[in-house]
Image: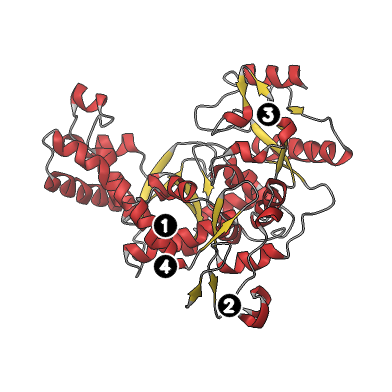
Amino acid sequence: MTTHPTSANVLIPQALSPEATGPAGLGPEAPDPQVLTPELLRAWAWHRQGLDGTLQGADAADVFTRAGWARSVGGANPYLTLFARAGTSRAQADADVLSLKIQELPTARGCTYVLGRDDFAWGLQIGRDAAVAPFRVLARMGVERGEITLLEEEILHALAEAGSPLDPKQLKDLLGDSVRNLGEEGKKKGAATTLPTALGLLQADGRIRRVPANGRLDQQRYGYTLWGLPPTALDDEAARSLLLERYLGWTGGATVKQSQWFTGFTLANTKAALAATGALEVPTASGEVLWMMPDDVGRLTSFKAPAEEQIQLLAGTDSLVLLRRSSGDLFADQDKGKNVLGSTLALLADLPDHPIFDRGRIIGLWQYDPGKSRIAHWLFAGATPAVSRRIAEVEAWIRDELGDFRSFSLDSPASRQDRIDALDAAG
């Protein structure tokens, strides 16, 4: 693909689709930076995330492919990700996990996300380096690679003999002295035994997979079972380029720093992947430069923010928030000084509460109070009928399908009571 520099320092690629091209089909016309205001870019990201109704009725795997993998830390974010975009029930999501249409797997930066089937193999490949890293800690404590390899084989044999998932305690009991206890030194370094490292390597290779103990994604009790996932045909460079292409599509554009945070790539690998994807630099009204996929540059040129309210309650780890990890960009100027429990919200990388959105802008915060089966909330400018209606819908969905809405595995009604009280007081 041939490119030409422009006066706006934006690369204009040739041979793009007609609807994404400028005069004479030479490439997408770069939007005027002054048009790309924070307000427009918030609405654009909202659209790219499918939160404007464009993913309604889509199956779970398609949602994760088009809007981004759902971060899973033993919380309910994967369920709300699907419900907000596609209207998916918890029962359907659990059925999709059971049938291997979607799975929770370690991938970018070694973090666990829920992915669609087509992304399993290369998603695991992206997380392979993170799975190998714990062995380096073990090596410094005298554990040789051969010992871990032998333990991996014994784990596979134990799972084959069992014929059903085994949790880590069951495996440890079965394997006995094959699992080495690393004592106090190991505990200090986060490696009490050799078992987690062996399990992580097997999972990264697709030879085993985790199975939720009760079939639900919003907890962290798992067993392991044999898998045998065929490896991807991609080399590591191609896998990195694919992830960055997906990431820029999910976000609608991001800075190099934001891209590096999500992917965990080095600067050199990031630059190589950006070049491979054909991504373009797009200046914005704030002076920030976003990298975007060429087709998105063309679409953004003609994009108009929705005129009517579009209200969603999302998790604090939703892709709209987490992929860029710059929550300050999601607040209107008049709300950037808002604070709760002594913290200024717009200055935090991670939100302390779940956000309420209207077309990409945070208009309030919420938490679920299971003791009263209600959503505690704080709306910065008060409720409109659309906001009240959506709060009631999500409240009923949580009550009837989830029972509670945990942010992460150790979240509990007691641990969030102070936040619930603060939201009630602010509201």
Which numbered marker is on residue 276?
4
Q: Give x and y (percent) for residue 245.
A: 49, 62
Q: Residues within 10 Å of mark 2 (few under 14, many from 20)?
A: some
* 3 or 1: tag closer to the N-terminus: 1
Task: Inspect the image, locate mark 2, and give the three-letter code of the amino acid beneath it.
Answer: Leu
Residue that carries the numbered disc 2 in the rendered image: 16
Disc 4 secondary structure class: helix
Drawn side of residue 64 relative to residue 189, left or right = right
Q: Most extreme residue toward the front, as rendered?
A: 7
Viewer-nearest of discs 2 and 3: 2
* 2 or 3: tag closer to the N-terminus: 2
Q: Residues within 10 Å of mark 1 (few under 14, many from 20)?
A: many
Viewer-nearest of discs 1 and 2: 2
Viewer-nearest of discs 3 and 1: 1
Residue that carries the numbered disc 1 in the rendered image: 123
Task: Inspect the image, locate mark 1, and give the three-letter code of the amino acid beneath it.
Answer: Gly
Q: Give x and y (percent) for residue 145.
A: 14, 46
Is there a contact, CB below 8 Å, between mark 2 and mark 4? no
Task: Inspect the image, locate mark 4, and give the three-letter code of the amino acid beneath it.
Answer: Ala
Q: Give x and y (percent) for residue 32.
A: 67, 60
Q: Give x and y (percent) for residue 285.
A: 65, 50
Front-most of residues 270 and 108: 270
Disc 2 secondary structure class: loop
Which numbered marker is on residue 368?
3
Q: Is residue 49 above or below residue 77?
A: below
Give the Cα separation between the discs numbered 3 and 1.
32 Å
Front-most of residues 299 and 81: 299
Q: How many marks?
A: 4
Disc 1 secondary structure class: helix
Give the Cα separation between the discs numbered 2 and 4.
16 Å
Task: Inspect the image, locate mark 3, and give the three-letter code of the amino acid beneath it.
Answer: Tyr
Viewer-nearest of discs 4 and 1: 4
